Structure formats: C-alpha cells, structure tokens
Image: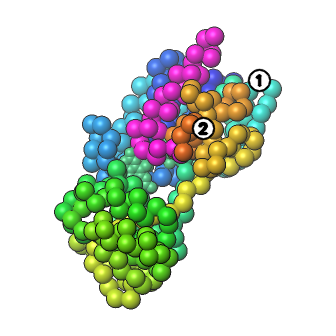
C-alpha cells in the first residue's frame, strides 16, 4: 500500500506530489487531463511564470517530478474512491489496476458552466475570461465587453475600470434602474439587447447583440463552477455553501485520511476558494506537508 494517492495533476496535485517526493514518501498521481485552464494560452499573476503557457508549466513540473523515484504518474480518470481496511482505494475508469494508499489528497479542480451563448465555449480561456486578476491587464487601454446576467457585474466593472480603456456591459434587461445608474456612473456603456452569439477574430471579439459590437475581450460574470469529480460526494465529505469542500488550516477534510487542495476546497472562514495557480500550488504543498507530519507523528 502506498503512502498517498493524489487525484489531480494541476498545480495543486503536482505540488503535493513534489513535496511528497522530496520527503521520499510513495505517491501515485492520477491525471484525467481535464485542467480548469485547459484552453488558456498564457497564464498570469504567477510569480516567475507571468505569461507562461499552462501546458508548458505542467510539462516542466512533470519533468521535474521525474527526479523523484517515490512518485509515479498515471494518466487516466479515477471513477470511485472508497474507504478500505487501512486506507483508501481508487478505482480507475479504464478498468485497470485498483490502487490503494493510506491517505488521499483530492486535487481534482472545478469545472466551469458557461451561460448558453453560442460561440462562448469556443473562445473560453482565449478571448473570454472571468478573473480580472488573471486576464485584465492584457486589455489595458482597450474596450472590453462584460456579459451581464449576474449580480457580480458591478463588482467586475469596479475591478476592471482602472485597467481597461472602456467597458461595454451587455444587459439582457436584467439590470434595474439603480444598477444601470451605478454602472453608468462608473463609466461603463450599457448595451441593452440579448446576446445572440459571440465570435473571435484577429483583433478581438464580435458580440452579436441586436447589432455587432466589437470588443477586445469579454468578461463573463454568470459562469458558475462545480466540483469536476464525484469523490467529495462518494466519501461524504463536509461541504461549504460555495460548493467547495471544507478543509481546515492544514487541508484536512471532514474524513480522517482525506485531504483536499486547490480550487475544490477552502476554509469556512473564506467565502470561496481563491482560484489561482499559486493558491492551488500552495494548498497542495500544505496538504502534502501535513500528510508527512501525520505520517511521522
Ligand atoms: C479561463 C481561465 C483562465 C485562468 N487563468 C488563470 C491565470 O492566468 N492565472 C491563475 O493563477 N489562474 C488562472 N485560472 C485559474 C486556474 O486555472 C486554477 O485556479 C487552477 O488550475 C487550479 O488548480 P487545481 O490544481 O486546483 O485544478 P486543475 O488545474 O483544474 O487540475 C485538476 C486536475 O484534476 C484532474 N482530475 C479531475 N477529475 C479527475 C478524475 N476523476 N480522475 C483523475 N483526475 C482527475 C484533472 O485531470 C487535473 O489534472 C484560470 C481559470 C480559468 C477558467
């Protein structure tokens, strides 16, 4: 039986594996190849990697993990995790070998559900985004579009206003007079028509909303995120109103032996996980370090 099964090879899972490898603890990392930033060409706000392609970041991390003999990577999805005598069992979806370990670190990430605007899924992560910290600066001085449909519109506009040149908020008639006035006072232009479709071109995005409107990029306020994997439910882990797995300061979930790291989990003192590469990696390191402390205790 291994020390740890890590499910997920995004920044949280890869960092957890690195930490365990450096402590010569046996760890197996499962990776189904579904990364939250899988369509992103350049990630930002990542120290020493501002502008790095996420795929390159993962490739370097995996290559460096190759130096650690106690860490193995296995490509493929896990279907089920269950409690067994002395630990946990992970059942792969491909019917391959069932793996066992004394502990599990879940680092399976979140999946984003987008509003049903034709063309939006095709430009998600390349021209359409949700996080001003990650993707705002690249539009400095240019006009961007903000897709309404969520109470977060004003908040997003307030964050982007100091960065971009101009903002067009696309409103499907959901904004009341007070909200519209607040956006106008922030200098946002309101375009009141349902968005029929969006499409990227060489210099930005055409938003078809009654008429074609050109913007450099698009921020989506009504995307929602859900747990990508079913393991929190399968294991009956304590959850938070945000949809995140509840963890303590050390990444422990409500079930002894199971840790959670990255976008899927946060402490109850926070309203949600701060979804970022560095925060996910930090959480992965914390979880792995806490596992090591428990192993030596
Ligand atoms: C459009 C977009 C742009 C972004 N840009 C930035 C940015 O510029 N800078 C930044 O810091 N953050 C950015 N983010 C956020 C960043 O992508 C996440 O915070 C980060 O990827 C979270 O890492 P994670 O390890 O928790 O999850 P992920 O990176 O999503 O990794 C999850 C891992 O779990 C695996 N997995 C899931 N289910 C299973 C299963 N059943 N079996 C086996 N493996 C499984 C997946 O294959 C994957 O390996 C962006 C997000 C989006 C959506």
What x and y, as percent, mark residue 35? Answer: 48, 51
Q: Position of residue 137 (x, y in %)?
A: 25, 54
Q: Give the quadrant of residue 259.
A: top right
Please identify the dominant SS of the magenta region.
helix
Callout 1 crowding tier (Cα within 10 Å): few <14, some 14–19, many ≥20: few
Closer to us: mark 1 or mark 2? Answer: 2
Span highlighted in magenta in the image: 272-297
| Closest to the observer, 232 or 16 | 232
Residue with the mark numbered 1: 86
Q: CA distance from mark 1 to mark 2?
A: 29 Å
**Is the N terminus in the top left, top right, bottom left or bottom right quadrant?**
top right
Q: Is residue 88 left or right of residue 288?
A: right
Quarter of the image holding residue 141? Answer: bottom left
Residue found 37% across the figure and 67% down from its top: 182
Image coordinates of residue 79 in percent, x first then y, are: 69, 48
Label 2: how many residues lie within 10 Å, few (<14), some (14-19) or many (20+)? some
Residue labelled 2 has its Cβ within 8 Å of some atom of ligand 1: no
Q: State the mark number for residue 268.
A: 2
Here the colouring is rainbow
């Amino acid at each position: 039986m291994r020390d740890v099964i890590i499910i997920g090879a995004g920044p949280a899972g890869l960092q957890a594996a690195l930490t365990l490898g450096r402590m010569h603890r046996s760890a197996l990392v499962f990776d189904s190849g579904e990364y939250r930033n899988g369509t992103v060409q350049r990630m930002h706000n990542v120290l020493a990697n501002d502008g790095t392609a996420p795929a390159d970041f993962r490739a370097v991390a995996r290559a460096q993990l190759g130096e650690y003999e106690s860490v193995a990577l296995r490509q493929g999805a896990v279907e089920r995790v269950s409690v067994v005598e002395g630990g946990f069992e992970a059942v792969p979806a491909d019917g391959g070998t069932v793996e066992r370990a004394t502990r599990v670190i879940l680092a399976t990430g979140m999946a984003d559900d987008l509003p049903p605007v034709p063309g939006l899924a095709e430009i998600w992560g390349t021209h359409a985004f949700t996080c001003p910290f990650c993707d705002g600066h690249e539009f400095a001085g240019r006009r961007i579009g903000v897709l309404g449909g969520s109470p977060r519109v004003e908040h997003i506009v307030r964050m982007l206003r100091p960065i971009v040149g101009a903002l067009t908020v696309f409103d499907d008639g959901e904004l009341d007079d007070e909200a519209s006035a607040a956006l106008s006072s922030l200098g946002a232009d309101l375009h009141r028509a349902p968005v029929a479709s969006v499409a990227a071109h060489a210099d930005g995005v055409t938003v078809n909303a009654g008429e074609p409107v050109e913007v450099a990029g698009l921020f989506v306020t009504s995307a929602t995120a859900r747990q990508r994997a079913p393991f929190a439910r399968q294991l009956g882990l304590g959850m938070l109103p945000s949809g995140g797995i509840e963890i303590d300061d050390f990444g422990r979930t409500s079930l002894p032996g199971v840790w959670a790291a990255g976008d899927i989990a946060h402490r109850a003192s926070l309203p949600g996980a701060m979804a970022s590469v560095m925060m996910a990696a930090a959480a992965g390191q914390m979880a792995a370090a806490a596992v090591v402390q428990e192993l030596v205790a």
